[in-house]
Amino acid sequence: MHSLHYASYMMEEFVFINKLTVSTVVVFLTICNSATVFASGNGVVVTHSNIGEYLPVWSIIPFVGMLLSIAILPLVKPHFWEKNLLKVACFWSLLFLIPFGITFGGQLLTYQLLETVLLDYVPFIVLLLGLFTVTGGIVIKGSIVGTTKTNVVLLLIGTAIASWVGTTGAAMLMIRPVIRANAWREKKAHVVVFFIFMVANLGGCLTPIGDPPLFLGFLRGVPFFWTMKLLPLLLFNAAILLVVFTVIDRYYYKKEIAAGRSPKDMVVSDSEDKKIRIEGAHNFIFVLAIVGAVILSGTLPNFATFADQVTGQLHGIPIFGGIVFPYNSIVQIAIILIAAYLSMKTTRKSTRKLNEFTFAPIAEVAKIFIGIFITMIPALTLLRANGASLGISEPWQFFWTSGALSSFLDNAPTYLVFMTMAGSLGFTEGLATTVGVIPESLLVAISAGAVFMGANTYIGNAPNFMVKSIAEENKVKMPSFFGYMGWSLCILIPILVLNTFIFF
């Protein structure tokens, strides 16, 4: 019933856009005059392949507006934000889509929208939904008490498994035990912040399963275990972060004790419940099924049924204007949804209740990221069209540019843009990929930038926002959008500067 409620609610939100939103869009169009908002092409045929040459820089205004809404509205209008989140996302999306459609025509608009929503957003949100649902049925029971030592161990476990079950899988599996272990504390937001740094981002750098950007590299010829070259960077960054976390957590721990709160408050009286054990462990089978679906999706194009073995063009269901919904993606989505369905059917309600499982966090992420995916179309398009002219050629430049943009754009397409840019520079020595020969030093820099700097903001990587939502649902007072960026600026940026001097 819970899932049906959210599905119905989201459907109502999608269909209903209030009059204020539409009126504002009309006012915007009247003031700006859509013919001048975007370049008209001056008689040149504009297609989806060259659209970036005709979009002006200010076409990213709706994307900036979407980011500012995420940052500001929860602070100044929290109740409005909670009730109208999807309407805000639709408002900024329409602010881009309507003038774009008027200027370039409905066909190009439909192509861009379908390509983004169907080929990028749908697989993205289905993967998150599957991992969220399945891991929500796994409960680590027993008296895990949130001391500094325990928190360090939990962060280490989450970071270690992230590359093998994905940052989303690791985050969804470990965040609830971390929250329950620290429930006795008043000051615990810092634990979740470091959890986002390490488990939801840093830990996913060793395999293509770990983080979506690396999976895109795998699809374009990067060997599966090549990403293990990032192990020295993982160890270096994890060690520093754990030292910093230990100092901060120990400080707050002592303050909790001084205030009269004790970790003993969390120890349950029933001796049987003190033993740490896993309930709903059969869901690990479904986690493996989801991970297997992602790997399978990347290997199926090696067969003629799923892709042209000469051109590499994926076979699939024709949708519109040359867009096909690839068969390998359909197989992946089907397996993930079946795994999620079976998890819901085979897991006791009491188990999910122990996790305080609801679909609210994934619903919030789905609404926010539909706005992000649509409004970032011009930003990514401009980057693809003009990236090669940016004068970027050194590893440290690739590290910071790919990382800085991955902090605010989806890190998967950003990684792909910079990988393509590196492949087009004409190198003859390095790793041979489908986008060209890339020196390994450049690919390491791009990979590290996209994965590590996704932790700089809540929207840099999807698990970040999901962890935040789950924490807030469990009464953890998390930093605001800019507050979280304050943590990343003070802690992550200095560490990333050290990375630059040591590795790049």
Image (cartoon, helix red, strand yellow):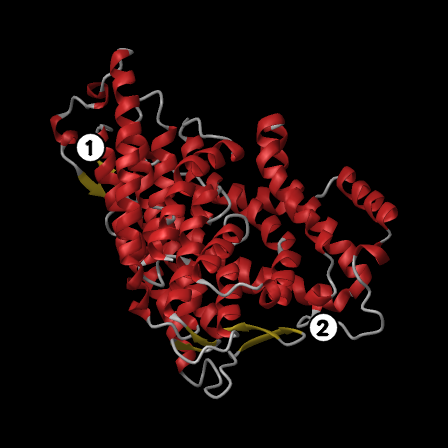
Q: Is residue 287 left or right of residue 471?
A: left
Which residue is at a point 47% across and 48% down the rendered structure image?
462
The residue closer to the viewer here, 284 or 41, is 41
Kind of residue indicated by mark 2: Thr
The residue closer to the viewer here, 354 or 220, is 220
Q: CA distance from mark 2 to mark 1?
A: 57 Å
Q: Earlier in the sequence, mark 2 or mark 1?
A: 2
User: Can residue 1 be seen at all in this image of the molecule?
Assistant: no
Residue 439's x, y, as percent? 40, 71
Give SS at disc 1.
helix
Relative to 433, say whether 261 is above or below.
above
Give SS at disc 2.
loop
Neighbourhood count class around disc 1 (C-alpha, 10 Å): few under 14, some 14–19, many 20 upward: few
Q: Residue furthest left?
A: 271
The residue closer to the viewer here, 472 or 12, is 472
Q: Is residue 407 left or right of residue 298?
A: right
Q: Residue furthest front?
A: 501
Q: Is residue 424 left or right of residue 109?
A: left
Residue 494's x, y, as percent? 40, 41
Q: Is residue 296 left or right of residue 18?
A: left
User: Can residue 156 be seen at all in this image of the molecule?
Assistant: yes
Label 1 sits on residue: 149
The residue closer to the viewer here, 248 or 93, is 248
Residue 101's x, y, as percent? 77, 60
Which residue is at a point 65% across and 48% down the rendered structure image?
63
- Displayed quadrant of residue 85: top right
**Label disc, if present, on residue 47 of the rendered structure:** 2
Residue 237's x, y, as percent? 31, 47
Kind of residue indicated by mark 1: Lys
Neighbourhood count class around disc 2 (C-alpha, 10 Å): few under 14, some 14–19, many 20 upward: few
Which residue is at a point 34% across and 72% down the rendered structure image?
223
